[in-house]
Image (cartoon, helix red, strand yellow):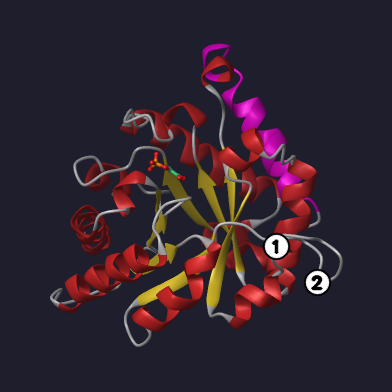
Amino acid sequence: MKQMLIAGNWKMNTTSIEAEKLCGLIAGGLMKMPRIDVKILVCPPAVNISNVGRVIKGSRISLGAQNCHYERKGAYTGEISVSMLSHLGCEYIIAGHSERRAYCAETNELINKKAVAILSGGLIPIICIGESLEQRKAMQTFEILENQLNECLYGFAESDMENIAVAYEPVWAIGTGVAASVRQVDEAHNWIRNYLNNAIGAGANNTILLYGGSMNADNAGELLRLENVNGGLIGGASLTADSFLSIIHEGQNAIRM
Ligand code: PEP
């Protein structure tokens, strides 16, 4: 069966009470679904991970974080380590989201350090890559993706490939309401799978490839059915239980085909 991960990135949204309510509604909705083979993940703001963890305990929802530091501990004021997140029950950590690249000056080199730390800590890094609109217009998309993959996955072995996820998130599609077209997503994901296979080895056939960028209940079905799409990293549409549950439903249909 095709791997399918539906991941919600709540970004800097939800107070603790709102976070508990949202994940409670998602967990409640999942209980009404007859069958769930899809892996479901929520990545709340760091301050809400603990309480969300308590609410989703025993449900089908896994817990993730939006960011971490690459050092194990020490004098890094304001930072959070992989082991701290692991102790709260996180299984996944997003690394290199385009918003962190843009607003926190995160580089491929830094993202690589984080991804290595996440993997070494026994968690799954969700490594984000994607081109800007200018780069796409200049026909540089695959050059950019190649560079991001080379640098963010530097030093990764073939055996690591089943323990990571790569999220293709074209920057121009994130939070804009304009998702990439089915053809664009198909082309990019086939290219990424092929590239990883050639560069690292056939183990990359087991790498989870997520699409992110304005995925919603209406477009999720056709995107999730693409051969090399193993799920979605969802921002806006993960903030209401109904739309997130609809995407989960589409993911479930996509792997049943
Ligand atoms: C994201 O945060 O990774 C994302 C894809 O956001 P949105 O779904 O809102 O475009």
Reading the chain from its start, which is encountered first: label 2 or label 1?
2
Amino acid, disc 1: Glu
Q: Where in the figure is residue 15, as x and y percent of width and height?
A: 40, 61
204 vs 182, left or right, is right
Tell whether position 67 is magenta: no
173 vs 122, left or right, is left
Q: Is residue 104 above or below residue 230?
A: above
Query: Which residue extends farthest right?
Result: 75
Instruction: Please indicate, yes or no, whether residue 122 appears anywhere in the rendered image.
Output: no
**Residue neighbourhood size for the residue with mark 1, other residues' Cα within 10 Å, grouped as few (<14), some (14–19), many (≥20):** some
Residue at the (20%, 75%) spot, across then down: 28
The residue pinned by badge 1 equals 158
Which quadrant of the figure shows ligand 1? top left
Residue at the (38%, 85%) spot, across then down: 57
240 vs 174, left or right, is left
**Closer-to-camera residue (190/233):** 233
Q: From the Cβ of disc 2, is ligand 1 less than 8 Å away?
A: no
**Closer-to-camera residue (160/243):** 243
The magenta-colored residue range is 136-154
Amino acid, disc 2: Arg
Toward which corner of the image does residue 251 lie, by quadrant? bottom left
Image quadrant where one finds the N terminus: bottom left
Residue at the (58%, 11%) spot, across then down: 138
Main SS class of the magenta portion in the image? helix
Q: Are marks 2 and 1 in contact (CB under 8 Å)?
A: no
Q: Secondary structure at mark 1?
A: helix
How far apart, in angstroms, are the residues tagged by discs 2 and 1? Answer: 25 Å
Q: Is residue 55 above or below residue 11?
A: below
Toward which corner of the image does residue 249 lie, by quadrant? bottom left
* Label at residue 72: 2
Q: Where in the figure is residue 119, as x and y percent of width and height?
A: 69, 68
Q: Where in the figure is residue 157, as x and y percent of width and height?
A: 75, 62
